Amino acid sequence: MKHVNNKLSLQLDVSDFLPADKEEKQSLVIMRESVSFWRDGVRRFKKNKIAMASLTVVILVLIFAFIMPAFYPYSYEQQIRGSENLAPMQYSKQELELIESGVKVFPHILGTDSLGRDTMIRLMYGSRISLLVGLVASVLVLIIGSVYGSIAGYFGGKVDMIMMRIVDIIYTVPDILIIILLMVTLKYPLEDLANNVPGFGWINRIGVGLICIFIVFSLLYWVGMARIVRSQILTLKEQEFVTAAKALGASNGRIIRKHLLINSMGALIVTTTLQIPSAIFTESFLSFIGIGVAAPMPSLGSMASDAIGGIQSYPYRLMAPAIMISLIILSFNLLGDGLRDAFDPKLKD
Amino acid sequence: MNKILLNIQNERLSFFTPAGEVKALNDISIQMNEGDVLGIVGESGSGKSVTAYSIMGLTDRAGRLIGGTIEFNGHKINEMSEKELQKIRGNEVSIIFQDPMTSLNPVYTIGNQIREVIMLHTNKDKKQAQERAIELLTLVGINEPEKRLKQYPHELSGGMRQRVMIAIALACEPKLLIADEPTTALDVTIQAQILELMMELKNKIGMSIIMITHDLGIVASICQKIAVMYAGKIVEYGTVDDIFYNPKHEYTKGLLNSIPKLTDKEHKRLVPIEGTPVDLLNPPKGCPFAPRCNSCMKVCIKHMPEYTQISDDHYSACWLLQKEKMLGGEKYE
Amino acid sequence: MPAYITKRLLMSIFTLWLVATLTFALMFMVPGGPFLAEKAPSEATLKALNQKYGLDQPKIVQYKNYMIKLLQGDMGVSLKQRGRTVSSIIFTGFEVSARVGGIAILLALVIGIPLGSIAALNRGKWIDNVIVVFSTAGIAVPSFVVSTVMMLIFSVKLDLLPTYGLTSWKHYIMPVIALSLYPASYISRLMRTSMLEVLGQDYMRTARAKGLSQFKMLFKHALRNAILPVVTYLGPLLAYTLTGSFVVEKIFTIPGLGSEFISSIVNRDYTMIMGTTIFLAALIIIMNLLVDIAYKIIDPRIQLK
């Protein structure tokens, strides 16, 4: 079939038909620069506004919880007589008298509780506890889970089967129940240990409640991480660079450390970051019920719990820890999401 | 004189993505008569699949027709609504896809998925659809059809699943079957069986086929006409003989050259086509193949080549042909 | 299938036994026994009480007796609530918790699944962004925060809803919302991700190529595949609702199983603790088994071992 008309639509002359030289052809080719995995991920992360915002919030919260208390004139267990139940920015009678006489009294920005303790500093310490629990628990979970999971995944076979059976059983046991039971029952022997056996005095300094939480997390919560690490190892194990490493004579431990775990780093970072808000959630939940950190050390959960009684007259005592917890959990979640979007593009929408 | 089945004129299609406008099709024209077997050849990104999908209105939601017309079996495709298109899909025009492993829904039985398309476009009830399904499975060469109908996709091999896809595609006796790389994901021996099956069925039912592939071997065995695409343009179009024995475009020549031949000497080196495919976000003004062409001229970089008619059914878009024309006088029509 | 069910049942019984034994052991790690927390009774009274409840016998014997009675469905009497058997307390409490929890779970599903699907279908548009924002916030706020804040707004400030008890339908509103907010948000996100993945699958393209209507494509082909992760979540969902009930029941003063459990721990009511733990564990384990079976029915690819 005839398809084409005869006349050219352009005006051309003979010189146009000379061969093109190399430079003219090169100008057509736009090469895209190659970037390393990490730099690419960081670049993607920086582009993500929400992720950057959540990172900022996290940093601010960290400053609030760990650095600010050093500059704050009140301490968390300090009960100031006469300053009970103050509203935010309100001064007690004694404090007003002091101001009259020229002494500078730092205002109670969020007021005080029923025992005259400054709410703001308690909020800071409560946040500190929550963050500590979140971070330490996540690191514990990461270490135990990774070691367990990588051994199971790498060696495979019978070792893997037995290890995963154990994981299955632990997984089936309802964890919250066990946590509560453990926390209630471990308290006494731990206190015993702290008070009576030399060398264990540090237990009291950190607080029995906190230790319990850490123990419980170490015993139960690593299974999720182990499963993820194991599946990562299983996938990576089959890849060629592992065979290459083996051919070069690398020991098993070296292979696991240097090759497999490094390549799973992306998934590990994301999972750990998302583990933090979950740990904080659990800690505040337990403190709320009354089984967490012991008084006078404040926890955001126990502060909320205490505030319910006075909810009619002092609503801010509830709002402060409530907003704080939500903020911390939300920002860590968004941070984790942002990291995942940046470093694990397969999961991206 | 055969009826004109498909008439695509100057189709332009782009995908509007967050990264920008991807110009997938740039002035495509194709005509097919009833009973034709057309092969569309090209590398990934050449636009061969997009062309076929656009006939059914099946392109991604991000894709939009920005120029040209598509007429199929009396329908003006580019003017039809989604609802109207649904009536002809699976009915007058069908498509089979590349990967049979993932093209069937894993949670429903084979029977369910075949009956579905039958009951959608015809008045048959479930029982009649079941009978038709058994007929179809036998037609595509699957034994024990009643048993197979009750099975799930993951219980069948790749070759069998592709036959099921063909059965679904043919269920309503379409005028046009589009096969998008139907054998790429299959073993070579199965490949031959599937191709044979398609030709058998074409003759039995009298339908037309568009075969999309990057494999020149397939094209040589079953197609009558071939369109060679590159970067969203048809760079050469002709009969099988034209293309294989008288290729005029450098890209076509390159493709043919890169196939190792049995008669070559043992140590003859493979001849790849140098360079990388075109970035469709920023297509160049000139011939898209220019950077990779050994005969590239200055005009090729500056201007998009126009079509030169070489013979009745053979044309190509290359400045070299225009050069020949200019220098050799009226050699071509 | 029957082989699978039997195997899982045996595993479940084993796990349950493990939980019971573990709980039993833990109970006795607490020094002092159940009666020491109160105003210290006299030696004689203590001895008599211990004898009455069989607490003076060696631990192994107590354990054996308990296990035997358990198999017969007898969980003993409460040590602190005179005259009531553990089973009766559990069942009265469970009835209440089940009602509130059941409504919460239903609500979470009814809200989460459609919202997630709508978000996926309208990806990138404003409704998707709104849903994503709300569901992300919803999973970040702990249930006790939601409860207390709601209480602040609706009871204290606006005086619209009651703060304790369960006597009218109004009493259900806040507890149910508090319990269902997290799961609804989680399910919505889960559904969205799942639906997005399903919509990108080849078989959806096949469905469209067949000429199916968008309705059919969504409700027949997409939904059944997309809902699988949500089904898997049902197990943890139940566990979450149970534990969430501890908090919600405490705040809204609802006489459910959760608050019974907490008080029995605080009061060191051993038999109650044992009974409740075993009951709750059994509930979770059975639920997980049912979920796995349901999953197998919906998705024929799964090979259950």
Image: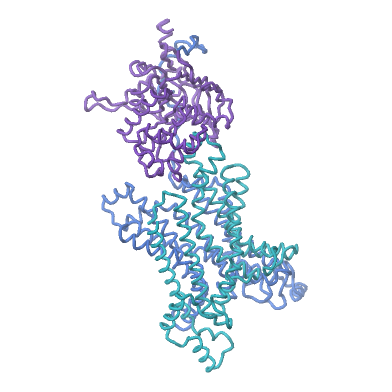
Left or right, residue C229 beside residue B166: right
Please give the letter of the chain rendered in cyan. C
Q: Nearer the viewer, residue C137 or C69?
A: C69
Q: Is residue B18 left or right of residue C162?
A: left
Residue at image location 36% in from the left, 50% down from the top: A236
**To which quarter of the image does residue A252 belong?**
bottom left
Rendered location of residue A257, percent (x, y): 35, 56
Count numbered badges in the picture: 0
Chain A colour as displayed? blue
Q: Position of residue C125 (x, y in %)?
A: 61, 42
Please say whether residue C48 is visible from this viewpoint.
yes
Along the line of sight, the residue nearer the viewer: B188 or C51: C51
Q: Residue furthest top?
A: B329
Q: Give the side of residue A126 with respect to residue C154, left or right.
A: left
**Vertical comparison of C57 with A52: above or below:** below
Which quadrant would residue A100 be assigned to in this image?
bottom right
Residue ID at (41%, 33%):
B167
* Residue sitting farthest toward the front: B127
Rendering colour (chain B)? purple
